Image (cartoon, grey):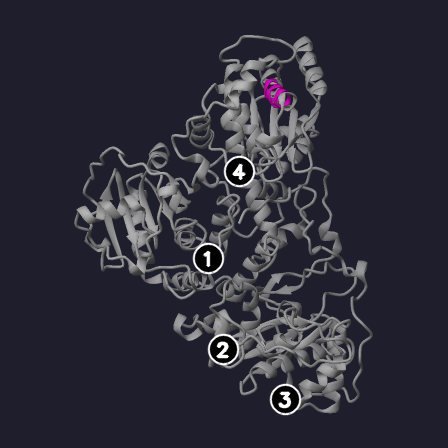
Amino acid sequence: MQRTFLPLEPHGLDCHPKKRHKSTSDQGSGSTTNTTFPGGKLISDHISLVSHHQMAVLLEEHDKQPLPHCDEVFPWLHGYSGSKEPPRGYRWTAVIRSQPLSHGMIENSGLLKSSLDPHEFLMAWDHRKHSLESVIQDVAKSVTLSDDELKLLIHACKKYKLFPFLVTDADAQGKYGAGAAKNRVCSSTPTSQPNQSSGWKQPGMFRRFDLQVAKFIEMSHTCVVYCLNETQHWTSCHCQELAMLVYVARKCVDPLGDFKIGILNTKKIDPNWWGTRPMKVEALQKEKVTQLASDFDVASFNNWDRDLFYRERLEISKMSSASCVSSEYSTWCGNSTDFEIFRLTSRLSAHDSAQNNGHIVTGHQNLNTVVRLPNLATSNQRTVDTQLFNFPHPSKEWKFFVHCTESSALPELSKISKLLKHVQSEFSIDHTVISFPNSGSLGLGNLNLDSIKVILNTCYLIYCVGKLTSFGSLIYCSDGYTEASFLLVAYSIFVWDLPLDQVLFKLHKDAQRPFFLFPVDLQVLGHLQILLRELSPKRINTTTSCLEIDPDLFSKMFFIKYQDNYNLAQLKGPLPSKVLPHLYLGSLEHAQSPNLLQELDITNIVSVGETMPWLSTAISRQKTLKASQINYSQTVQRSNVSVTMSSSEITRIEAKSSKIDNYGSSIVEANGFRVLHITDVDDNGEDRLLAQLDEALSFIDECYKRDEKVLVHCMVGVSRSATVCIAECMRRLDCDILRAYLYVRVRRLNIIIQPNLMFVYELCKWQEAQGKRRTVDWHIVCRAISELNRMYF
């Protein structure tokens, strides 16, 4: 699954799709008229009030509770809930917010740790499709409620636009879910049978991260509703209504369960309970026009429970921050954040600029990340800004900018020619921004002589700016690589006079520049490189106002087959993803390209559940050893790579049917590579990695100590191998699973990593086994993953 990203504007840190910064004063209370119940007490015996002391005890119990063993919760976590009861006996506490803060406060502040919104686990009610009264009548047949409780329940459903059913309720999904018959307002009679939990093996069910919050509600011993606005929960808030809604939803799916529903009845909140403290709308303001992060931005960053989308954009801006790809011609490549920050800081006074120089980032850094940042303090805003963002400081001021976007067409040749004449005559350039099409949008079919002239002369213009003026250029796009990679590679071929494959390796190894080329880009550049190199300044010393293309050469370029010595056209990306200086994540096709790995200085491979065909041959010729039998301290003499196979020759060998070895994992040395071969692990939601994870990490650690690089791969490089890489990052970066997941996810570039539920759960158990304190709950990890992936699936 490929992905693209939105730009991270420095003044738009609050531009989350869910409007996370919205003030309650802007939206009113966001609620319907409150229902007042007489007597000044809770109307249901199923709901209790929770004091400050009781809440402290509940949260302490929750924090001390270890995760259940996999056998206890799987496959129950995979599917909808129906015939099988949830796991019992766990002292979990679910914390649920009933409503935002009062007027003048930021809506998404005042959040307790791991707090949930009812819309994350209850089924949505569409009044156009279902009669609420009819649904409640059906509920009343299975859940005994008094008249006042029914009244409260109906009011809650209308207020929240929710059904009193968990999204994991198989029976309710069968009757009222998206896949059910479109029942009209006059009827709630189902026409199809519900999807029972026995169907978890259906495609996609073992990646239902979106169901895990509701699953957690089912497992929780106590659910506590809070609002922080009131302590009189029968007069002016919605806590009582939501508590009743949660009670009925839980009762419908778990009628025999022993659980409690409470309402937090105190305004006293211990400091360690906060995820995001209550903040007034003034916290959104910035004291200076050059300030990048507001106090609320900092508070949001510190709360890793929520809004991983925000941190993902920060991480992307760090990972792909501007780096120099041609120091000779002062050409840089970066992202939209670099452009905005440079535009913003270029207006600083000389004094402020001198102060900022102490926090300048001049190019790519191997561990350029927000993942390792501790909680930030707002006492020194300049320090906060420089921790969250890179401040580009090129040796020559940028004046020429090429913005690559999906919506852009090729610039007019007349405009490019005019700019070239100005640069060549005046030896200068004004602040200029031009647009250029995104990578993957230019195919051989829509290329003609005029369009190729534009591409060629755009590269020539970037070169002339760096060669003839005292200024530099920035090629940029939203995420720093997706849209800009085609132009970046075309320009590099032009100025370096190198073939396509060598340019890719030089960008990766020397410039350390992330890029992602689509197959169509490789196809076009494979032919276009003939013209780009023929007219390269390395070959021709010219100052012509516009480069011309020889018609004969133009005709021949489409008939000349370029050499693809590394099978790049068959690879996604096309290089494996560099996660850490010693760690690469890729696919079986990458592992099956020894020449490519050798060029990247990769001499070690971890094969997770897959077998390269050349490895099968090597194994049949030599004895294999268990991972525990290898003496890592011995120096291994590696022979030259002698095996090359195209992807068309790759045949998948199922680990469970293979007779290669009986160990589950073995180490083989062949064709210049040391390979840890892990078998019997499929991405099916059932197979586990935890038992072999330590072996994989031990193998990677020895590679690290020998200062060698290692490729971890499975079939595609998104689940099994990604799980191993996440664990390595947890260890190497000393961070929890959520931060490591984000770190790996961003560096996989346009490939979405998708470890299944079992693997993610095992990573949480592995973190627990290392003696690391759980900083983010399991269901919150799942919620974050679900939110990140929602825009792509």
Report the residue marked by disc 2: 91
Quadrant occupied by the C terminus = bottom right
- Classify 10 Å Cα crowding around label 2: few (below 14), some (14-19), many (20 and above): many
> For the residue labelled by badge 1, is the local secondary structure a helix, a strand or a loop?
loop
Q: Find the magenta span and give its range.
A: 452-460
Can you tell which of label 2 and label 4 is closer to the viewer? 4
Do the residues under discs 2 and 3 have CB atoms within 8 angstroms? no
Q: Position of residue 777 (x, y in %)?
A: 51, 65
- Classify 10 Å Cα crowding around label 1: few (below 14), some (14-19), many (20 and above): many
In the depicted structure, whether residue 600 falls above or below residue 629: above
Report the residue marked by disc 3: 142
Label 2, label 1: how many angstroms apart (C-alpha)?
27 Å
Do the residues under discs 2 and 1 have CB atoms within 8 angstroms? no
Q: Does residue 143 show up magenta in the picture?
A: no
Q: Nearer the viewer, residue 655 or 228?
A: 655
Do the residues under discs 1 and 4 have CB atoms within 8 angstroms? no
Can you tell which of label 2 and label 1 is closer to the viewer? 1
Report the predominant secondary structure element of the magenta stretch: helix
Q: Position of residue 439 (x, y in %)?
A: 58, 35
